[in-house]
Image (cartoon, rainbow, N blue to C red):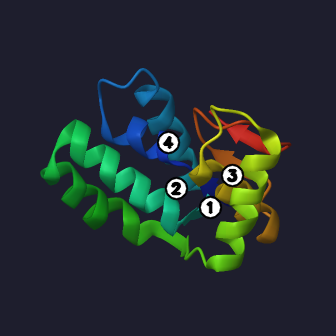
Amino acid sequence: MIRVFVDTSAFLALLNSKDEHHGRARRVFETLRAQEAALVTTSFVLVETYALVARRMGLAAVRAFRDDLVPLLDVVWVEANAHEAGLDLLLERKKRDLSLVDAVSFVVMRQQRLEHAFAFDFEDEGFSLLR
């Protein structure tokens, strides 16, 4: 079974029909569901997604995300060591456009041995990006 990390950018594209990546996101998501892929994300990605969805689309969209998509996910709850390793990576890279959430995602993906990511604003970091 394929295991795929799902980033906030993929969730936003799926939820917002006006997003420039919406059509591709739907196709990738439908393919992953047909393959019965395990969809993995982190608690940090969920927090980021809830905040952005609430701001951009409202609380009804937050409820739909929580009720319809979150139950399909294997959530890795970020603990202190992954948080600190992500912060170290962020500071190491010295790249303003790398977020702490993405840095922690990279750490978790390596810890979980995940090779594939469903994302649209994610640096590749050596992972196979599904777009």
- Mark 4 belongs to which amino acid? Ala
Q: Is residue 112 above or below residue 59?
A: below
Q: Are marks 2 and 1 in contact (CB under 8 Å)?
A: yes
How crowded pointer 4 is (Cα within 10 Å; few <14, some 14-19, many 20+) is rated as many
CA–CA distance in space, label 3 to label 4: 16 Å
Q: Are marks 3 and 4 in contact (CB under 8 Å)?
A: no
How crowded pointer 3 is (Cα within 10 Å; few <14, some 14-19, many 20+) is rated as many
How crowded pointer 2 is (Cα within 10 Å; few <14, some 14-19, many 20+) is rated as few
Q: What is the number of the mark on residue 103? A: 3
- Count how many numbered circles sit on residues in the image: 4
List the single residue furthest toward the right: 126
CA–CA distance in space, label 1 to label 4: 15 Å
Q: Which residue is mark 4?
A: 10
Q: Earlier in the sequence, mark 2 or mark 4?
A: 4
Q: Which residue is mark 2?
A: 33
Q: Is residue 86 above or below residue 53?
A: below
Q: Are marks 3 and 2 in contact (CB under 8 Å)?
A: no
CA–CA distance in space, label 3 to label 2: 26 Å
Q: Earlier in the sequence, mark 3 or mark 2?
A: 2
Q: Is residue 35 above or below residue 18?
A: below
- Mark 1 belongs to which amino acid? Ala
Residue sitting at 23 percent across and 42 percent down? 55
**Left or right: 46 with respect to 67?**
right
- Mark 2 belongs to which amino acid? Arg
Residue sitting at 24 percent across and 36 percent down? 56
Q: What is the number of the mark on residue 91? A: none
- Mark 3 belongs to which amino acid? Ala
Residue sitting at 64 percent across and 78 percent down? 80
Counting from the top left corner in percent of width and height, residue 83 is at 65, 68
Q: Which residue is mark 1?
A: 37
Q: Work out whether residue 79 or residue 29 is closer to the camera in this orientation and state it.
A: 79
Q: Earlier in the sequence, mark 3 or mark 4?
A: 4
